[in-house]
Amino acid sequence: MIGRHKDDKVVASVAEALAPLKDGMTILVGGFGLSGNPEALIRGVVDRGVRDLTLVSNNAGNLGKGLALWLRAGIIRKVICSYIGGNEDLHTRMASGEVAVEITPQGTLAERMRAAGAGIPAFYTPTGVGTIVEEGKETKEIDGRRYLLERALHGDIALVRAHTADRFGNLRFWRTARNFNPVAASAARLSIIECDRLVANGTIDPDDVHLPGIFVHRIVHVPEHENAFEFRTVRKRG
């Protein structure tokens, strides 16, 4: 296991946090669209100059922001995601063959990472039976219903955004920004956390810990974020 097994896992900079990153790695990144993105770590990966990455995320950014920075930098060779939607940066690179794309149903994607973190090698699910998702996968009938065998999804590194972290790595996420972040952290050999607030050990109430520090290896404190959003919806009066 890569990481720091001690009470203080805080590093001084994004560059130091990302020092183990190498070409060809599989990177799990939390976030849903632009919500819960580890913004500084995403930029730091581009600055580091690595290439040929396999990216696992819900939808690889949008509107040129978030993980779309990696697509525009040309550092991704494959994306495993559940949703492309309006992400033109991914659409165009998928169509040209520049980036290979594996579509996985959203719940299956989350469960594959959760399974990796829990030490479960594979599981059966009915999601995707009879669709293109079934191609090349083992199937099994259980109680008269057909299921697909889906394998756990491990990563070399996870990049995660937390709202609050203590120095050991106990984490609390902010509302919907929780999304894929906890399961991504649990599924990687090395989890790197970008936190909005850094507090002393013992400060976070145990009932408020969304992910225990045993899954965390490096923490970098980033108090300022853009917190970009995709579309603003407001209620009209009258």
Image (tube, rainbow, N blue to C red):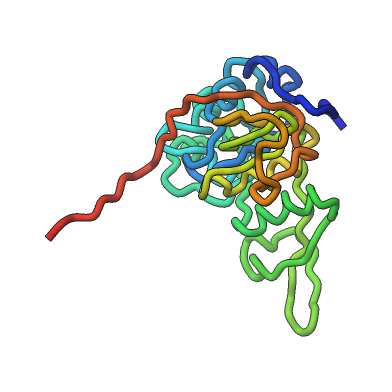
Q: In the drawing, does residue 71 fall left or right of residue 160? A: left
Q: Which of 128 and 114 is in front in this view?
A: 114
Depicted 231 relative to depicted 4: above or below: below
Residue appearing at x 75%, y 47% in the figure: 153
Q: Count the marks: how many?
A: 0
Depicted 111 relative to depicted 163: above or below: below
**The N terminus, quarter of image:** top right
- Is residue 26 visible in the rendered image? The answer is no
Residue positioned most to the left:
238
Image coordinates of residue 109 in percent, x first then y, are 66, 53
Q: Which of 203 and 125 is in front in this view?
A: 203
- Is residue 145 visible in the rendered image? The answer is yes
Residue appearing at x 82%, y 26% in the figure: 4
Depicted 99 relative to depicted 8: above or below: below
Residue appearing at x 60%, y 47% in the figure: 81
* Quarter of the figure with residue 196: top right
Image coordinates of residue 132 in percent, x first then y, are 63, 61
Image coordinates of residue 233 in percent, x first then y, are 29, 50
**The C terminus, quarter of image:** bottom left
Q: Nearer the viewer, residue 29 or 161?
A: 161
Image coordinates of residue 187 in percent, x first then y, are 76, 43
Q: In the drawing, does residue 39 fall left or right of residue 54? A: left
Residue appearing at x 50%, y 38% in the figure: 61
Q: Nearer the viewer, residue 172 or 231?
A: 172
Residue positioned most to the right:
1
